[in-house]
Each structure stands twice: as structure tokens, then as C-alpha cells.
Image (tube, rainbow, N blue to C red):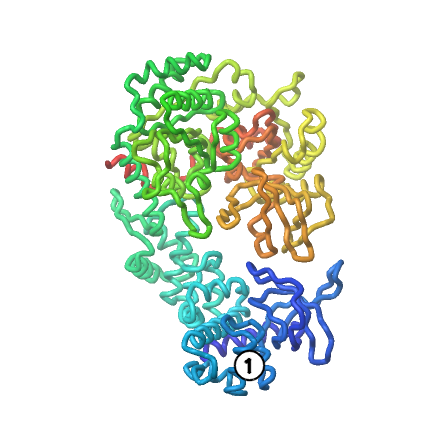
Amino acid sequence: MTPMQQKSLLDATSDVAALVHMQGTLERVVFHNEENGYTVFSLKTKTGDSVAVIGHMGEPQPGVSLEIWGEWVTNPRFGRQLHMQKHQTVLPAHVEGIRHYLGSGLIHGVGPKTAERIVDAFGADTFKVLDHEPERLLEVDGIGRKTAEAVREGWGEHRGIRDLIMFLQPHGVSTSYAVRIFRFYGKHALTVVQENPYRLAMDIHGIGFLTADAVALKLGFEKDSPLRAEAGVLYVLKKVTEEGNVYYPLELLVAKTAADLDIMYDLVEEAIHALKREERVVVEPLPDGEEAVYLARFHAYESGISTYLRKILGSPKSVAITAPDAVVESVVGELGIHLAEAQLEAVRTAARAKIMVLTGGPGTGKTTITNAIIRVFKSLKAKVLLCAPTGRAAKRMFETSGVEAKTIHRLLEYSPREDGFQRNEDNPLACGLLVVDEASMMDTMLMFHLLKAVPLGATVIFVGDVHQLPSVGPGNVLRDVITSGVVDVVELTEVFRQAQESDIITSAHKINCGEVPYLDAGKEQLSDFYFIRQDDPERCAAMVVDLVRNHIPRRFGMDRFNDIQVLTPMHKGSAGAGNLNMLLQQALNPETRLIKRGDREYRLGDKVMQIRNNYDKDVFNGDIGRVCVVNPKEKELTVRFDDEKNVIYAFNELDELVPAYAISIHKSQGSEYPAVVIPVLTQHYVLLQRNLIYTGVTRGKKLVILVGAPKALSIAVKNNRMQKRYTRLAQRLAEH
């Protein structure tokens, strides 16, 4: 045993000292989830008692001897159970036990008959032979080279996973992750983890720097280890991309990493140079003499967007329109609609251009113009494709145009099995026109993959409101494309008469122009925009709950779950998403069938939101659904999403779901709701920005109610400073 393994074992011993310790034989498997390892089984102890055990393990097999540590829990339905925290397989010492162990099906390639032959040949030395002299398997009657190799590989994998699980369990790394780690590194997994546990954070999706750092420090790695510095740089770069940056200035990166890891600047600089040599990061000079540091993939995304946009712009149109003005006039006449001159010019520009951005606020006619553009290309028998970043936005596109629309992921045919998009430059989309709605939501990665799949002859129309919040993911793609000046841009500013009758739309445009909208709470006539003054944060939260539960359904006839969405600037505080979700859940859904994970409850009927892209389940960041099945026995629940898709979540996947009675305004992008309620308080000061309030207000179709302090709203409307995002897309495009 190596010193590191000895240290790990000592740590494990101290960790489990306070737990119930038990030895016995796995008698019967009641339930096993192959995906995450969650298992319910019966353990027959040495005294002959049968104990119900729940916990995670790799491949449970009846007859295997186990040593387990856990704590007693009482299930309302199934009674007393031992919740297993750690376990290890105990290898049998006697011949009969060895025979049963090998033949239990635990080792791939070894069945009962093969096990019997091997044990007959080697007896009590069987495990020693399998570990150190597997070539001797050829001495066994009936085992040829092919079978011997299968047995050797099966035993090696079994021992590798078993040793890895035993090593990682004391450090809080679950069995499911241990299996994933072994699959990635193979038979050298344990050695890799011992020599450089920071590789876990670099290579294994779902294991972050903090977990790897905890493992490394327990193993005796020094705080100023170069391996820790390299992993720390990648960790900080990942954090800043999650804040919207595509790159980070070198000086800021060095300072932030040194502070976060409590190490010296020169150690960070050396780590960046090492990562550059390994091609994990790209360091690029900036015009001002500073240097930009990119995660390698984001440098590829940003450079790729510039390359593909230039290729499309430089290629002739596959749909040749010889007299665009005449075609537009004919189509608009057939549609029987009246377009203002600016709107007509937008349609004409789309007919002439290769790439066009159509931007403007609510009520300016973006939808009408988009439909006219679609009809122009359809009149010429062109293949038209429509897409949007979210399912809700795609559904709305279909409803307003009558033409099928897909999410960008579905359009590009994302394959979980291949872990990539099937549509690309080698297998491009088939279209003469591609229309992308809610383009302000597109981040750098999604834009790269979309452009990669666009046929060079296609016309591409990006439709979006550039004054809304930028994408949740890294980049500021739509604004950068506009700023670059390399594509045709049509910005609509005129609000038409019918739209002017909506207080939502007129208020949104006032906000966008830096004016505080009219805040008369005592309107005699029904309106679609209200401001209710309530300066106290706790009373504001109570008012929000009362509006959703009572006033809006009673006065406007709207459904509490399906029609009303609470949007909030922050997660914390009395009127933040966390507290509001707790209050709204209690008020709207006092259901008793639930699953608890940490301090969060998931109840039957709850409104929930997916908070990260999960390509295996085909659900994405921001998707909202309702919990339709709760299975406390297996600790699973099923969510029915807006696109009528049912998705099952195991217990350890519940961190991907959060309550969605109240969501952040950032998460509401690309969605529209019949009614929105928005708390606006001075405690939200750090996030009170014009584009935030503007985005929130424009999410409501029929009703918007702001609750809070007039001073807070005024601060937000007057604050037009947007948080800087580090991106070089506009410069890359302009340079060419």
C-alpha cells in the first residue's frame, strides 16, 4: 500500500468511526439504478439477521461479502433502514466462497462454469493468480486465449473500480463518479488520481475544482503545488466564462487566481505558460498591449464565428432574387397587410442581403416583418428553416408564422450518444433561408455550432431585441455582430398605433429611453401595467404571494401555475428567488408527497426549472415544467416539460432542478408569459440596471405588475451601465 493510500485509509477510518459498522452477505437486490448506482438491498449479517440497506454501489451481486458503514433512518413506508455511507467488498478466503464470488456475475466474462474450473485449478490461490499471474489461466481445462483474455480484462476492471471506489469514498466522490472516472482513465485510473487528482476537475464532467482540491489536500499535496496552480487557473477561467466573459485579461486572471487559491503571482504565471504549452488555454495579444487568456474551446468558438460569418457573407445567394423590390411588393400585396416604409425596407434588405439583423423593441413589427420575409422566400420555392434558442420561443415562432420552428439544438440534431451536433460543415442544413428568433439569447458556443451548419449560399436573418439582457452563456454575440458593421442591420424604432394602446409596450419603451413609466397604482380602468408601492422587503414578498394566489386569478381570470410568472432581479433577500419560491410553494402547493434533498423539497405538482444543459435527457437551461410523478421509495421524480416531454430525475440529479414559482429575470429570456410580477427593491441595488428591468417588463404579454420602491425603479431605469463582458468578436469581424 502506498503512503497516499495509507493516508486515505486513515482518513476514512476517522470519518467512519461515528457510523454504524456492519459485515455480512448481500442477500437480495431489491432495486438498482444502473445510471447512478442507487441501490436497495438486503444484507444478511453474521448473526443471521436481515437488514434493509439503501445507498450507492457499482454492480451489486447476491452472495458478495460486504463491510459497510452507515446510519439508521426510518422510512414512513418501509420502516427502519441502514443508509449506507461507505462500503467495501470483502474478498472471501475459503474455496467455496471464492467459487461463489467469481461465479456471481460480478466479473464480466466469468460465469458459474468458468469460475468452477478456475477455482478447481488454483483453489485458495485463485485471487493471487488473477492479480499477479493471469497468464496461468491457460493452464485451466477449457479456457483458451480468448476466454483467458476476457477473464483477465473483467477481473482487472472489477478490481480497478473496487479499489478506486474504496479510495475515493472518504473524499465524498460518489460511486457513480468513480465508475465514470474508471471508464475515462481505464486500468490506470487509481494511479492517475493519486498522482494528480486535479485531473479530475480537468477531465471529468461534473467534478469541479473544489472537489479535486479537497482530495488533493487530503492526500498531502501542498497549497503551492504547480498542479494545483494549473487546475486553479482553469477553475477561475471557467468561473469568469460563467459570468459571461469569453476571455479574461492576463493581469486580472493572475490576480484573481492568486487571491482565490492564496498562492504567489509568479506561480500562477508559470501555470498559465504550462497550460498554454498543453494547449488548454490560448494567450492572445490585445491592441492595448495587454494579453487575453481564453479557454482553448472558447477561442475556437469565437474565431470560428468570425470565419464562418465571413464565408457566408462572401458566398453568392442560393436563392437568386433578380428584382427584389418587385417580389416584396407582390408578396406584401398578397398578404393584405400595410407596412410602413421602414418595415418595407427591412423586407427588401432581407431579400438582397446574405446576413441581416432585425432588431427592435415590442410593438415595432418584428413578427410581421419576419412573416413577410418568410413569404418572400417561399414564393420563390426556397426551403425555409426557423429556429430559436428555447422551446418556448420556437413554439411562439410556429404560432405566429404557421411554419414549423425548432430549438437550435434540435435543428442541429444534437446526439447524446455522439456528444455533439450531427449537422455541421460536412453535413449542413438544407435551406435557402434560415431565420433565428431571440438571437440576443445566443451565446458564443451555440452561435459557433449554428454557423458551422449553415450552407454557404443561405440567407440568414437574426431577429432579436439588442436592448435586452445578453445571453446567459459567454459572449455578447448579437451586439458584437451589430457593432462590427459587417452585416446589414435594420433597427425598428416606431411603435405602431395598436401597440401604443398597451401600457406594457409604452412603459417598456419609456424604460428603454431612460424614462420612469407612469406609476399610478389607482387606475380606475383595467390596464395591463401596474406599479404597487411597497418599500418593506418582507411585505413586498407577501404582496407578491397574495397577487399570485388571489388577486390576479380573481380579477383577470388567470391560472396561478400556467399563466403567472414571478420574475426577480436577485436570488437572495426577502424578495429574492430563494425566499419567494419557498413562500409560493407553501401557498400554492401544500402537497405532502415529496422528496427532500438538503434544505429543498420537491413536491408533486411543483413548478420547476432545469438549470443546466442536459443533452442526455434532452432538456436545457431554462426549461420549465411541472412535477407529475413522485417516487419516494426510489427517490425519483418525473417532470413534464412545456413541450409535453416527461423526464425522470434520480435523487443525485435533483441539483439540476430548482423551484420555478419565482425565477431570475436572466432565466426568463426568450420566454413570454400571460402575466409577470416583478419585485423591485433597493436591496437589489447591485443588479438594478435598465436592460434588466426592460427585459423583465417585456416578458409579460397581457399583464405586468411591479411591486416595490419607486426609488429602486428610478435607479434601475437611470442606470444604463452594462456589466462589461470580455469578448473580441466585434474586433475580429471588423478586422476582416
Q: Is residue 301 visible?
A: yes
The residue drawn where x is 41% and y is 77% is: 145
Q: Is residue 725 visible?
A: no
Q: Which residue is mark 1?
A: 116
User: Total marks drawn?
Assistant: 1
Instruction: Where is residue 188? Give x, y as percent.
Output: 41, 71
Instruction: Where is residue 105? Give x, y as percent.
Output: 56, 71
Image quarter where the C terminus lies is top left
> Eyeballing the image, is 3 above or below 229?
below
727 left or right, relative to 686: left
Nearer to me, 719 or 379: 379
Image-quadrant location for residue 245: top left
Q: Residues within 10 Å of mark 1 (few under 14, many from 20)?
A: some
The residue drawn where x is 61% and y is 75% is: 64
Instruction: Where is residue 80? Give x, y as percent.
Output: 74, 66
> Eyeballing the image, is 568 above or below 47?
above
Q: Secondary structure at mark 1?
A: helix
587 left or right, relative to 676: right
Instruction: Where is residue 231? Give x, y as percent.
Output: 40, 60
**Residue type pointed to by label 1:** Glu
Nearer to me, 719 or 407: 407
Image-quadrant location for residue 50: bottom right
